[in-house]
């Protein structure tokens, strides 16, 4: 047990080691999230009721992002630790913590009550295409889910203590328990209460999330009591530090709200199709892009505060190259093996073959932006490390607005220009099934996030890297290896498909798994011949026992 707990408290040695270890724990949470989605797909499948369930997340998500994230862990930690006596909890630190909790708890409850009362009016904004009965269902589900931002907001605050005392096991266990609550809702509550059981499961998961963090916080001495602050100066400073990140998340959430509103006019099940494909593409994004961005940030901040610009450039470049190195192969794998991935993960029960093909097509489109999303997460932190928040906020605002505009433009073009629709559906091999107009929404999101990355990359090159080598060599090496990975996987898939067939789970899994492994081996061989630096660093990280590194866990960004 001592060895197990030592894993969560050792200081990390380098960015690669920390990111790989964090990625492993993120993977554990993502696997459970995939099981959650498989359960939903199996018992319910894309449908009007599931559309209402996914749409019901949007307002609680916006409340959580707009209010709870204003007291982010990264902003709170310096304030609380400055009031402590080393590792010892002081009355001053406890009082400050109670002030923060009181203010944000009252704010979260107050806003949630207002939204609860006016939910029918909001239904016409978020799901205008729903029939009256489905709108009523949306209102009920949203009202149940309003418990989530309150509980998750509290958990976000208690998470500051668990991170402060390096209880990384507890912190990383919280999202696992959150998914357990949703799975309970799917398997046990859905048969009793119908789709409302899923919303109850979300609230239950949020309760699990906050309970384990609150218990740890109390154990460490940070007991909570309602305490209204006499001076809001420090709370204002905490909020000001968090505003840039909050605005970036809010802009993205608003673009998703518009996408859901637009999808509500499309074929029944369209919102479900979009969410299933979005959740699948989030797995590699969280494991790769977010892991490296979070792991790099403390080092980038340290380099800036110490005035060591060469170290800043070195860590930024190495992290960027690592994201490129991992993301490009995943992109090609997801595009080539999209049907096998979706069928193995989601394909059972109420999830039909047409559902599989539509979600697979959406996944292929989203996959083209996995690299862009991961790089944006890193490059925006380069500005945050310098205390320059205006640039990433403006870029995020512009690109979120672009996603909204493109969602309408692409959907209109798909209906008005048959040649455009035929071209896209034939490439994605979905021309013979209904409901393909939903694919314009992932396309709009992907184009907007790719532009976001390009703008970030241009400005980071100009402001920080100048003539320094960045990602060009790694990009072309990884692109060449990934292209051959895709070709190898595609050839293997065509050879194995007649052998294993597409009827049984085992057959679909084996053809996808073997083709993927073959493609990866081809990519490794190409990278080895090209003497790729990242491949050598990966081998070194594995040899230096990366599991002894300190665990870095990203914050919860949405429900």
Image: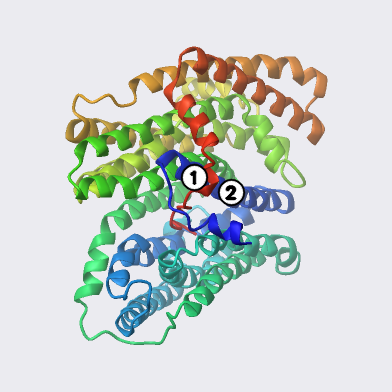
Instruction: Give the percent coordinates (x, y) of residue 231.
Output: 20, 82
Which disc number belongs to residue 318? none
Q: Name which residue lies at 52% across and 42% down.
A: 546
Q: Would residue 484 be seen by someone viewing this image from the given angle?
A: yes
Label 2, residues with CA under 10 Å away: few <14, some 14-19, many ≥20: many
Label 1, residues with CA under 10 Å away: few <14, some 14-19, many ≥20: many
3 is higher (above) or lower (below) than 505: below
Mark closer to the chain start, 1 or 2: 2
Badge 2 is on which residue?
Answer: 30
Q: Is residue 506 left or right of residue 468?
A: right
Tag 2, which secondary structure?
Answer: helix
Q: Is residue 8 left or right of residue 1?
A: left
Depth check: give the residue in front, 148 or 2: 2
80 is higher (above) or lower (below) than 368: below
What colour scheme does the image use? rainbow
Q: CA distance from mark 1 to mark 2?
A: 8 Å
Badge 1 is on which residue?
Answer: 286
């Amino acid at each position: 047990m001592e060895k197990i707990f030592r894993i969560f408290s050792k200081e990390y040695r380098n960015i690669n080691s920390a990111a790989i270890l964090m990625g492993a724990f993120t993977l554990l949470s993502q696997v459970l999230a995939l099981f959650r989605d498989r359960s939903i797909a199996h018992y319910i499948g894309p449908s009007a009721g599931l559309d209402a369930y996914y749409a019901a997340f949007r307002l609680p998500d916006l409340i959580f992002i707009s209010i709870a994230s204003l007291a982010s862990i990264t902003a709170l930690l310096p304030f609380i630790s400055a009031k402590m006596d080393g590792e010892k909890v002081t009355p001053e630190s406890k009082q400050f913590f109670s002030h923060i909790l009181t203010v944000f708890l009252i704010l979260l409850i107050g806003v949630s009550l207002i939204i609860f009362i006016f939910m029918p009016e909001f239904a016409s904004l978020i799901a205008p295409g729903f029939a009256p009965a489905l709108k009523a269902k949306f209102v009920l589900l949203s009202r149940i889910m309003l418990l989530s931002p309150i509980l998750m907001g509290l958990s976000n605050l208690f998470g500051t203590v668990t991170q402060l005392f390096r209880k990384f096991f507890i912190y990383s266990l919280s999202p696992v328990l959150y998914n357990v609550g949703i799975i309970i809702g799917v398997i046990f509550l859905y048969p009793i209460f119908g789709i409302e059981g899923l919303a109850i499961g979300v609230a239950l998961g949020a309760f699990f999330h906050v309970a384990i963090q609150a218990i740890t916080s109390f154990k460490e001495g940070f007991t909570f009591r309602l305490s209204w602050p006499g001076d809001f100066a420090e709370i204002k400073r905490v909020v000001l530090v968090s505003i840039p990140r909050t605005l970036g998340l809010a802009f993205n959430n608003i673009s998703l709200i518009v996408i859901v509103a637009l999808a509500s006019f499309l074929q029944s099940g369209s919102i479900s199709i979009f969410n299933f494909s979005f959740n699948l593409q989030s797995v590699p994004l969280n494991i790769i892009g977010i892991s490296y961005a979070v792991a790099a940030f403390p080092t980038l901040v340290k380099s800036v505060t110490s005035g060591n610009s060469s170290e800043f450039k070195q860590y930024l470049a190495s992290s960027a190259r690592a994201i490129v190195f991992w993301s490009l192969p995943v992109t090609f794998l997801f595009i080539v093996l999209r049907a096998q991935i979706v069928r193995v993960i989601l394909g059972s029960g109420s999830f039909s073959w047409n559902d599989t093909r539509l979600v697979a097509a959406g996944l292929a489109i989203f996959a083209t932006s996995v690299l862009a999303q991961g790089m944006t997460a890193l490059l925006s932190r380069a500005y945050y490390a310098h205390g320059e928040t205006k640039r990433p906020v403006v870029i995020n605002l512009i690109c979120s607005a672009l996603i909204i505009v493109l969602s309408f433009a692409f959907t209109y073009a798909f209906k008005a220009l048959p040649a455009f629709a035929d071209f896209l559906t034939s490439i994605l091999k979905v021309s013979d099934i209904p409901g393909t107009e939903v694919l314009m929404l992932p396309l709009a999101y992907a184009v907007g996030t790719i532009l976001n990355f390009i703008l970030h990359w241009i400005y980071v090159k100009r402001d920080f890297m100048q003539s320094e080598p960045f990602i060009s060599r790694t990009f072309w090496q990884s692109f060449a290896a990934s292209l051959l990975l895709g070709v190898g996987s595609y050839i293997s898939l065509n050879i194995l498909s007649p052998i294993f067939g597409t009827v049984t789970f085992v057959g679909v899994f084996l053809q996808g798994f073997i083709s993927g492994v073959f493609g990866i081996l081809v990519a490794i061989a190409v990278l080895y011949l090209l003497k790729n630096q990242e491949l050598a660093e990966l081998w070194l990280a594995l040899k230096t026992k990366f599991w002894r590194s300190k665990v870095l866990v990203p914050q919860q960004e949405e429900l």
